Image: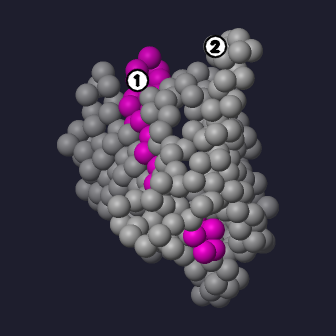
Amino acid sequence: MRKWTMGIGTALLAISLAACGTTAEPTEEVDDKAEVSEMTLEEVFAKSTEASESVESLHADMITNQKIDMGAEGMQMDMDMETSMDMTIEPMAFYQQAVTTINSEDIQNDNPTNEMEMYFTAEEGLFLYEPTMGQWMQIPAEGMEELTSLADQQTANPAEQLEQLKEFQDDFTFEQTADEYILTLDASGEEFEKLLQSQVEKTFSEMQVDMKTLMEAMQVNSISYELFIDKETFFTNKMNMVMDMDMDMEDETMNIKSDMKAEYSKYNEIDAIVVPDEVKASAQSIDMP
């Protein structure tokens, strides 16, 4: 990273502090001055972080579109996933339904669309329905420490995203509608190298992965976040994330463009996640190596 002189560093600090003290610019749809909030970006971030600490459960609907280009091979693939999830934070548990569609002219795929249904509880493990076999599969809790680590990092929990983005709050643009604050962040891969590293490390920390090799193989070309925060509750209503990254694999470069849109609702309205008795009774246990 570039080494700044003390004078330039002081000037940048003053600019960033001024940005944090700036109120949100109203969008064109805000006509009533009474609907315009005077809260600063720093205050909104603090309030939202505080509100997220009170979240015990929530519902999330997510749509993810990925375009994968294998570079030298010329192979291209589009992968779309629609996910609906009920989630509790303590204890960590979720029920998820997802539909994944993979399209590519370069790959023969007789079944481009796959449906997935799963339950996860820390006590009983993961229950996954395998539609082609018509069978529920179970990975017991004692055999899935790695999957438990992944479950803790579910994108469905906006509190995790807020915590990761907190140190970059000075770089957000700040707008407001009558009902929401809109926080937008656009950054280059170099600027977000630390954030990327923290996300990858959280995902793979419990697995046998060489983090240094993995990070050296990845390059983020651009990344952007858009957060919609409710003015009354300070809960995150929606989050959009767009990322363009390259990954080197066996002397070839793969480009991945990802567009994820998430909507959050039913804060603290979800009851405990319970695996149905018929699912547990019919599930075939899988032993993890």
In the rendered view, does 273 fall on the left or right side of 246?
right
Q: Tag 2: residue type? A: Arg
Q: Position of residue 89 (x, y in %)?
A: 72, 69
How many numbered dots are placed on residues in this image?
2
The secondary structure that most of the magenta stretch takes on is strand
Q: Quadrant of the N terminus?
A: top right
- 26 up-or-down from 77: above or below: below
- 275 up-or-down from 162: above or below: below
The residue tagged with tag 1: helix, strand or loop? strand
Label 1 crowd bin: few (<14), some (14–19), many (20+), radius 10 Å: some
Identify the residue under disc 2.
2
Please give the range of residues in magenta. 231-256
Q: Position of residue 24 (x, y in %)?
A: 53, 55
In the rendered view, does 144 fall on the left or right side of 252?
right
Q: Residue, x 65% and y 88% (percent of image)?
A: 277
* Residue nearest the observer in this picture, 118 or 286: 118
The quarter of the picture where residue 115 lies is bottom left
- 64 up-or-down from 248: above or below: below
The quarter of the picture where residue 279 lies is bottom right
Magenta stretch holds residue 54: no
Tell me how far mark 1 sits from mark 2, CA to CA.
27 Å
Q: Which mark is residue 268?
A: none
Identify the residue under disc 1.
253
